Image (cartoon, coloured by chain):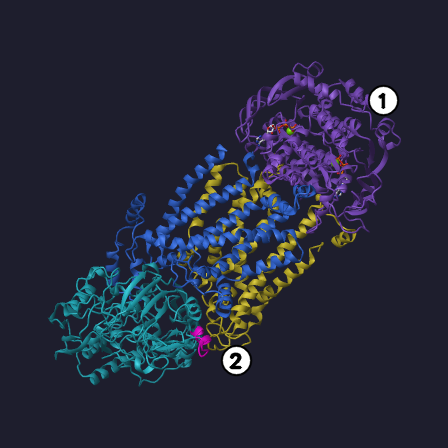
Chain colours: A yellow, B blue, C cyan, D purple
């Protein structure tokens, strides 16, 4: 790796690794479900106690990563898959009507409380992980599209974009390859926090009966459902919450590190960094 | 500026259309939900005869479009209709809940902007050094903590252990201003996540701006550091942050359900929850009008800001 | 009189002391809350109604009717005419409570336009034929013999309001222990002691009902000294604070039946062997420990543990998967798949569904849990689906049967329709002798135990938290009975 | 400020500065001394390291550069130097809280080659000026400060040849012409009152009249005791201003000494080609070979800006096949606007632009590939027109891929060839734009447009940042293309009257109006409009304050005159 801001990178990697490994490998080690104990008890062979329905928290934690990683990540990715082109179209178009046609309906969606949306989905969707990912994505699209548009508007009107157009460059390359890349940093920052939001939306939805089961082994659902026992058996909330925190924090730190590294290497001539020679060497390792 | 003026006018006009769309959509959604006010009121005694009687009493047996038309006809007179559940005017629901929501939103936004911007600027200024790492890690960590957990934590520590602040605002009703101490914890909980997202957006924008030649020029020319950061670099990070801020205010005004429930603050979120649970369509519609207007106005504001901070867009070919 | 229920289980001892203001936090119904006692449906509504109004009778701890505004009742031999005498009592505006008020109240409830909840309970009464014999005597004419008529007088929501009262939501005038001072729907109601209360003036000067929907908010408010009484706490919360001295935990036993309701009129549950197999699948202790967090007792597939006429001589059912499996095989349903409807409408529902799903897997039954919206859950599961989570508050066994288990019952969630069973019920209602009646109820319950549609796996505690200074809170009365949320007997030490 | 380390009398000093990036030495042992009140000029071919040297005085170096040597400003070390202590100066030492503090002691004024880059796109141009001025009026009572600051700003703008400053301070950078942007940045430097001003090509992009005034102003700056470092290809300006001249070639100082000596008698091979402008010698005919057919026609064009102001009115203008049309005019007169209208980059206009018989869509987004390829535009601000994250050659090659359907591989080869013909090595072309000099980028921008094989090539100041040799080569190349590719015509937006002389026709713009149009010979030798006359006069008579006697000065003028 070329001179990534190593400390941040290492921290991010470490933070991501723990939850990711548990999420991916956990189910292999979970084993068969043991008999249920009373809910929210500690001890009795349960390292981390039992959860709200008397299951072993360790086992639930081992099982609960996959859906988090899959649903939340895919929902966030999906939201951006739609929001980025949409936001970029609006930032790049000179046709006001097109922008209005695309953005105003999204504003309408924004004004509808997400609770109502989720309730409706609960009634209309057959519960399923895909449906849930779609729903979480849908709730996030209007918001994400606005952020994309706002950050891209300036970049989209620079002479470099005019030059690309003059070259007959395809819309996709201009928008995503150039404008998108120039605003990658705010977008990544936004996506990072949105991932966290998506996680907990999944949990809320689960409670209302959409997507994963309300007693599913899922970290976000665990955090939500075990909260009543917070004072009796905190581990059932604290451990999955810490894993979620580690996952999202780690993701964000990694993205930050990657962006920092990109800036260091990809704009070599920006001629604004004063570097001691030894620093230079370190950077070029 | 005539271009801008007509743009705003057009957006406001569109805003009216949008609000109508929001109301229609919300009406449709609420109607589409299984059950109606009669079923909801019947609760665990779903005696079919009684439900039928309730339906008749609430005029729910009339077609949806007729009820909607009736409700809409009252709008020009400022009449938002009457609640199905209690028969009280919807406007009394809204006016009662809007105060607390507005107060909370205002109290949250006032420190939110300086805090979010300040932290973002601070992190960007010390990019990749321990300050930044600390700010980044803390903001991300806090953001990943669900609201209820943060609320419970704060209440446990500051209200129940240390006894510095009241744990809830129960019993204070709408007179929250009379009990400022009760607002501290809810505002802190409300602040936590928006501060994080705002500061991350500001940080991201600032890092690019601080590395730009125009900031280097301002520095070189001896402009005080703070002024360089806030007056010259920050504006470049404003556009996405303004969007985020608008969304936050929207969220604050249109339903901070968890915090309202946790601290017993009778705001719009609670009213919405109850009204949806009761399928109290007129109340939900009244709320939709409020939410529609709030969203339209906030989005317009955010777009104006974004427009101002991307002045070059006006000349795009 | 039935006002002595508090003597036994008052929380803390000492002589009652007058004065003070008690703040009680309840989960509420938002801005749609009402003061109209006939519209009351939430616990908060009922608690307020109870403080402002009286019924003619109310339920004792064993769910038998105790006289309240009625000082006594007496049936004609045919059990279809009942004479009820009223005690001397006054409304808050000084008018005496009369037979005319009683008839006005009941007619108001029965008015179809009002669609009041208690209308169904008053169904046996022929209100047109009933009359006021004198100022303090009412003669009720019934449509058929009803031995348990006092239960009707005690039924949920059958409050007595002054004749002609219309604007009950804004200006409530009752005969209850407290008078209204102010009311803000969804937030607060302030009440003051009614010094002229017939059952002895309350000890408290003032009573304030506060609304806090979130359980943790009620607990926090209680812990933080913002309220003195918090209604409806979680078992986990109770465990966290029980015996710590900061707050008192009051567990009201047998308050809520927890069950799975099988629709007996459709496959696969139209086969009694399948129902019996399901009875044997349930590990009730695991359900109580898991879904109720241990705050409750196991059930025996019968409603009304602790109630009058409850058949507690029947053996406690336990899990027997082998037997269940063979029963299913017999019924030709070895690879059975059923959908279990649940919802977050009541505490423990989704949990119980998950636990039962796992238990059923042990018997080779695949249970698919379907989580539905909570606002229309009860109406949804009344007619559709085959298996659902069910719960019921305390009520006399007779009411349970009449509301849920007769061919013409309005909320027959198990679709239990058997002419002979209906006949047994009618026979019981026509039997004046208590013992004979008990025997008849026993027969009905044995039938239900053997092949009924309710898999009653537990009875949940109702948990209340109070400040240590609060005394006089009854510890035995199940929710919905007379001594539950009875603030006129509570005092502050 | 000890000053002890600085050589006596020097306000800034570079000693043995070597900068290498990626193994290539872009500066090699450069030493330089800036004395108060003196003008030190750096000249040399494009890419020779002038800008790099200038930036070193600001403490800035290319990212990833290995640097050795010393840079001192006002006695303080600047930057990194191996043994050096704290990096000081305005250099953005990452995250350093102390950054900029030392800069306040010894700020260095900087007028960069690409002024747009240092103008904040989201702030009005007056903002920074005002902030600088505020720092200088701290002594005044609070109320008077604004007033005083404003007065200073306007004064500085006037000094930087922006007399209508009041109207311009409220504009955003993109609302200014290239020359106006440059003068705004110059005004910043003037306002700053720095002890050292690094002026990187301050006269490019300015018309002859303005250029003369700018030169006068820089002379006045020096007269105030400020050390000026002038990096320029504009030998006339150098001659007029410089006290000492350093000639750079491939990062090495090949010649240094008093201006008169260096410019007159080249001592080394480095300056061999320097003084004489050889254009005159190589060319005796006009550019291209005009044919009678009209390729491009502008009809009744009224161009507005979004704020509603009309900035351009062209009743009729025709471009014939194979011809070169030069567009002249003062800075801010609307030349770029005209060029952008042709290119489809400025669409708020009434009237028509016809390509042959076809009306071109206003916006280039509505033009099809053939139309796009047919009219190509070379941006005035070349640096801003490139994506800073992609290697230059890739960007250039895309034109051929997109507009001519050439396979990617061939396109890259073609791009290399074209860049090579313009004097850009493959090595530099494989860098990102940040790694190239201003002149190099300008040529790359030209190459990018040429790869489209356009029928009309609109060049906006393509030669402005080039040294004489490169400029000549570039013009030669264009001329060659005009001749060999019979279907190409050229619109040359320029302040360079020498170049304009080789155009077949000339159009002169003044305040958005075409005031004169005709064959170049006519217009430039016998101008009818007073503005044209003034421009011609000004370009001929570059002011020579303390006249540099001898053949050096005359040779330049003679050659220019001779070409007419
Ligand atoms: N977006 C804009 N809004 C308002 N005025 C503008 C805008 N862009 C340019 N102008 C003004 O239009 C005039 C013409 O600008 P243009 O860029 O065409 O000048 P130019 O002749 O190319 O000058 P230069 O030689 O300095 O590049 C200038 O006075 C400029 O200030
Ligand atoms: N970051 C970098 N990496 C590699 N080479 C670079 C970098 N920055 C500049 N160069 C090279 O260094 C040389 C000197 O560049 P500089 O900008 O100093 O030239 P210049 O004399 O100002 O040229 P011009 O007259 O064209 O502006 C150029 O050939 C350029 O390609
Ligand atoms: Mg240069
Ligand atoms: Mg121009």
**Does residue D232 appear in the picture of this structure?**
no
| Residue C241 among those drawn in magenta | yes
Q: From the viewer's perspective, is A93 left or right of C180?
A: right
Q: Quadrant of ligand 2?
A: top right
Camera-side residue: D308 or B70?
A: D308
Name which quarter of the figure residue D157 lies in.
top right
The reply to whether dot 2 and dot 1 touch (C-beta < 8 Å) is no
- Examine the rendered structure and indicate whether residue A105 appears above or below residue C234: above
**Which residue is tagged 1?**
D551
Q: Is mark 1 within 8 Å of ligand 2?
A: no
- Judge the density around disc 2: few (<14), some (14-19), many (≥20) Cα neighbours within 10 Å: few
Image position, residue D1 (x, y; %): 78, 46
Image position, residue C126 (x, y; %): 14, 69
Residue sitting farthest toward the front: D141
Q: Image point 53% across, 79% down: which residue?
A: A43
Name which quarter of the figure residue C130 lies in.
bottom left
Magenta-drawn segment:
C235-246
Residue sitting farthest toward the left: C133
- Judge the density around disc 1: few (<14), some (14-19), many (≥20) Cα neighbours within 10 Å: some
- Examine the rendered structure and indicate whether residue C13 appears above or below residue D57: below
**Which residue is tagged 2?**
A44
- Front label number (2 vs 1): 1
Give the structural element (helix, strand or loop) at label 1. Answer: helix
| Residue D374 among those drawn in magenta | no
Give the structural element (helix, strand or loop) at label 2. Answer: loop
Using the rendered image, report if marks 2 and 1 lie on a common chain: no
């Amino acid at each position: 790796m070329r001179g990534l801001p190593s400390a941040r990178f290492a921290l991010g990697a470490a933070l991501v690794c723990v939850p990711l490994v548990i999420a991916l490998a956990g189910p292999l080690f979970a084993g068969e479900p043991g008999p249920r104990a009373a809910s929210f008890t500690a001890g009795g062979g349960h390292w981390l106690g039992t959860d709200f329905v008397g299951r072993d928290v360790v086992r639930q934690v081992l099982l609960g990563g996959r859906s988090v990683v899959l649903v939340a990540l895919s929902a966030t990715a999906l939201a951006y898959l739609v929001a980025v082109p949409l936001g970029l179209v609006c930032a790049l178009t000179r046709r006001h009507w097109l922008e209005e046609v695309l953005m105003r309906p999204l504003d309408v969606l924004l004004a509808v409380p997400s609770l109502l949306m989720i309730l409706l989905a609960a009634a209309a969707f057959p519960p399923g992980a895909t449906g849930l990912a779609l729903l979480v994505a849908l709730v996030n699209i209007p918001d994400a599209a606005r952020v994309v548009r706002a950050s891209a508007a300036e970049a989209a009107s620079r002479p470099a974009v005019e030059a690309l157009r003059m070259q007959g460059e395809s819309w996709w390359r201009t928008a995503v390859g150039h404008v998108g890349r120039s605003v990658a940093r705010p977008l990544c920052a936004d996506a990072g926090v949105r991932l966290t939001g998506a996680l907990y939306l999944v949990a809320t939805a689960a409670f209302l009966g959409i997507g994963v089961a309300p007693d599913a082994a899922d970290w976000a659902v665990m955090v939500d459902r075990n909260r009543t026992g917070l004072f009796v058996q905190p581990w059932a909330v604290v451990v999955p919450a810490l894993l979620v925190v580690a996952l999202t924090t780690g993701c964000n730190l990694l993205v930050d590190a990657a962006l920092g590294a990109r800036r260091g290497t990809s704009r070599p001539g920006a001629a604004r960094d004063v570097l001691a020679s030894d620093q230079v060497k370190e950077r070029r390792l | 500026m005539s271009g801008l003026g007509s743009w705003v006018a057009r957006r406001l006009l569109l805003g009216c259309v949008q609000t109508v769309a929001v109301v229609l959509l919300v009406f449709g959604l609420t109607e589409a939900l299984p059950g109606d006010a009669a079923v909801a009121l019947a609760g665990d005694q779903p005696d079919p005869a009684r439900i039928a009687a309730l339906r008749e009493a609430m005029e729910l047996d009339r077609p949806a479009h007729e009820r909607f038309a009736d409700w809409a006809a009252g709008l020009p007179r400022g009449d938002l209709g009457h609640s199905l559940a209690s028969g009280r005017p919807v406007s009394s629901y809204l006016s009662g809940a809007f105060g607390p929501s507005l107060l909370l939103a205002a109290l949250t936004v006032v420190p939110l902007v300086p805090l979010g911007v300040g932290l973002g600027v601070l992190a960007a200024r010390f990019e990749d050094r321990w300050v930044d790492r600390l700010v980044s890690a803390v903001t991300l960590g806090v953001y990943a903590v669900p609201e209820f957990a943060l609320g419970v934590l704060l209440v446990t520590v500051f209200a129940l252990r240390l006894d510095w602040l009241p744990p809830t605002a129960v019993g204070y009703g709408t007179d929250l201003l009379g009990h400022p101490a009760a607002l501290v914890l809810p505002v802190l909980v409300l602040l936590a996540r928006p501060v994080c997202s705002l500061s991350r957006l500001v940080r991201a924008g600032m890092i690019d701006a601080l590395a730009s030649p125009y900031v280097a020029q301002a520095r070189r020319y001896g402009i005080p550091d703070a002024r360089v950061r806030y007056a010259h670099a920050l504006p470049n990070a404003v556009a996405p942050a303004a969007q985020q801020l608008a969304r936050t205010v929207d969220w604050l005004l249109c339903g901070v359900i968890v915090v309202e429930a946790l601290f017993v603050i009778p705001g719009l979120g609670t009213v919405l929850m109850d009204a949806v649970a009761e399928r109290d369509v007129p109340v939900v519609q009244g709320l939709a009008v409020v939410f529609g207007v709030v969203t339209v106005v906030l989005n317009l504001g955010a777009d104006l800001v974004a427009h101002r901070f991307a002045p070059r867009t006006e000349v795009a070919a | 009189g039935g006002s002595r229920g508090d003597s036994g289980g008052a929380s803390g001892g000492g002589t009652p002391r007058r004065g003070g203001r008690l703040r009680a936090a309840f989960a509420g119904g938002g801005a749609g809350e009402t003061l109209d006692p006939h519209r009351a449906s939430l616990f908060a509504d009922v608690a307020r109604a109870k403080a402002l109004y009286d019924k003619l009778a109310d339920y004792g701890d064993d769910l038998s009717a105790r006289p309240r505004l009625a000082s006594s009742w007496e049936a004609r031999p045919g059990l279809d005419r009942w004479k009820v005498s009223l005690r001397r009592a006054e409304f808050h505006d000084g008018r005496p409570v009369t037979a005319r008020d009683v008839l006005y109240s009941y007619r108001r409830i029965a008015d179809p336009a009002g669609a009041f909840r208690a209308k169904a309970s008053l169904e046996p009464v022929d209100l047109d034929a009933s009359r006021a014999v004198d100022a303090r005597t009412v003669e009720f004419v019934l449509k058929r013999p009803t031995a348990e008529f006092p239960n009707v007088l005690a039924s949920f929501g059958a409050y007595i309001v002054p004749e002609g009262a219309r604007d009950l939501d804004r200006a409530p005038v009752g005969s209850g222990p407290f008078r209204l001072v102010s009311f803000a729907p969804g937030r607060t109601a302030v009440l003051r002691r009614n010094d002229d209360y017939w059952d002895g003036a309350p000890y408290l000067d003032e009573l304030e009902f506060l609304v806090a929907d979130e359980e943790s908010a009620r607990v926090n408010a209680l812990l933080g000294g913002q309220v003195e009484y918090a209604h409806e706490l979680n078992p986990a919360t109770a465990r966290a604070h029980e015996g710590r001295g900061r707050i008192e935990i009051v567990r009201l036993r047998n308050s809520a039946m927890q069950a799975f309701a099988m629709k007996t009129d459709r496959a696969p549950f139209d086969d009694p062997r399948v129902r019996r197999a399901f009875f044997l699948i349930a590990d009730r202790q695991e359900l109580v420990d898991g879904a109720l967090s241990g705050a409750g007792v196991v059930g025996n597939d019968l409603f009304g543990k602790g109630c009058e006429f409850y058949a507690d001589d029947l053996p406690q059912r336990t899990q027997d998967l082998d037997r269940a499996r063979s029963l299913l095989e017999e019924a030709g349903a070895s690879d059975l798949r059923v959908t279990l409807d649940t919802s977050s409408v009541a505490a423990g529902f989704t949990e119980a569904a998950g636990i039962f799903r796992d238990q059923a897997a042990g018997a080779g039954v695949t249970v698919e849990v379907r989580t539905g919206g909570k606002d229309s859950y009860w109406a949804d599961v009344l007619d559709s689906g085959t298996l659902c989570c069910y719960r019921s508050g305390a009520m006399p066994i007779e009411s349970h049967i009449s509301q849920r288990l007769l061919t013409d019952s309005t909320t027959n969630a198990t679709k239990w329709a058997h002419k002979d069973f209906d006949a047994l019920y009618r026979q019981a209602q026509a039997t004046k002798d208590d013992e004979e009646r008990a025997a008849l109820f026993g027969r009905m319950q044995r039938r239900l135990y053997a092949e009924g549609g309710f898999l009653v796996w537990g009875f949940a505690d109702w948990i209340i938290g109070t400040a240590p200074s609060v005394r006089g809170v009854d510890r035995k009365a199940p929710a919905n009975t007379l001594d539950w949320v009875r603030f006129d007997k509570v005092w502050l030490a | 400020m000890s000053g002890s380390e600085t050589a006596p009398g020097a306000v800034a000093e570079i000693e043995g500065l070597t900068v290498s990036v990626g193994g290539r030495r872009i500066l090699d042992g450069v030493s330089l001394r800036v004395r108060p009140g003196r003008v030190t000029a750096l000249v040399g071919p494009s890419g020779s390291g002038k800008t790099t040297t200038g930036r070193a005085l600001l403490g800035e170096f290319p990212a990833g550069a290995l640097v050795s040597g010393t840079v001192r400003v006002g006695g303080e070390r600047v930057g990194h130097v191996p043994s050096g202590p704290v990096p000081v100066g305005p250099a953005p030492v990452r995250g350093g809280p102390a950054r900029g503090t030392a800069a306040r002691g010894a700020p260095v004024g900087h007028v960069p080659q690409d002024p747009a880059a240092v103008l904040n796109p989201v702030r009005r141009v007056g903002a920074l000026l005002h902030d600088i001025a505020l720092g200088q009026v701290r002594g005044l009572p609070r109320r008077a400060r604004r007033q005083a600051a404003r007065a200073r700003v306007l004064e500085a703008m006037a000094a930087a040849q922006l007399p209508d400053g009041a109207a311009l301070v409220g504009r955003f950078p993109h609302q200014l012409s290239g020359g106006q942007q440059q003068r705004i940045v110059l005004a910043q430097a003037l306002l700053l009152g720095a002890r050292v001003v690094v002026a990187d090509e301050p006269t490019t992009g300015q018309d002859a009249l303005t250029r003369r005034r700018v030169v006068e102003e820089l002379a006045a700056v020096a007269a105030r005791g400020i050390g000026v470092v002038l990096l320029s290809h504009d030998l006339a300006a150098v001659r007029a201003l410089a006290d000492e001249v350093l000639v750079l070639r491939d990062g090495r100082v090949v010649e240094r000494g008093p201006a008169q000596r260096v410019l007159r008698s080249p001592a080394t091979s480095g300056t061999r080609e320097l003084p004489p402008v050889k254009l005159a010698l190589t060319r005796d005919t006009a550019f291209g070979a005009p044919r009678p057919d009209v390729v491009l026609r502008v009809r009744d064009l009224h161009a507005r800006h979004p704020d509603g102001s009309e900035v351009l009115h062209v009743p009729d203008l025709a471009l014939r096949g194979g011809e070169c049309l030069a567009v002249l005019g003062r800075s801010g007169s609307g030349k770029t606007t005209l060029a952008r209208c042709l290119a489809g980059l400025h669409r708020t206009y009434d009237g028509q632009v016809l390509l042959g018989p076809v009306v071109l869509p206003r916006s280039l987004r509505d033009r099809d590939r053939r139309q796009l390829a047919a009219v190509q535009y070379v941006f005035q601000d070349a640096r801003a027109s490139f994506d800073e994250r992609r290697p230059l050659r890739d960007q250039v090659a895309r034109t051929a891929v997109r507009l001519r359907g050439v396979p990617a591989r061939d396109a890259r080869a073609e791009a290399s060839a074209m860049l090579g013909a313009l004097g850009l090595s493959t090595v530099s072309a494989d860098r990102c734009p940040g790694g190239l000099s201003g002149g190099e980028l300008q040529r790359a921008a030209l190459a990018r447009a040429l790869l489209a094989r356009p029928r009309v090539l609109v060049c906006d100041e393509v030669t402005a940042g080039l040294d004489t040799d490169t400029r000549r080569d570039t013009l030669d190349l264009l001329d060659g293309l005009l001749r060999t590719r019979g279907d190409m015509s050229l619109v040359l937006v320029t302040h360079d009257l020498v170049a304009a002389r080789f155009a077949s026709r000339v159009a002169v713009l003044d305040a958005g109006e075409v005031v004169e149009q005709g064959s170049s010979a006519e217009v430039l030798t016998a101008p009818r409009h007073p503005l044209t006359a003034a421009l011609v006069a000004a370009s001929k008579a570059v002011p020579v304050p303390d006249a540099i006697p001898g053949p050096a000065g005359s040779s330049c003028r003679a050659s220019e005159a001779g070409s007419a």
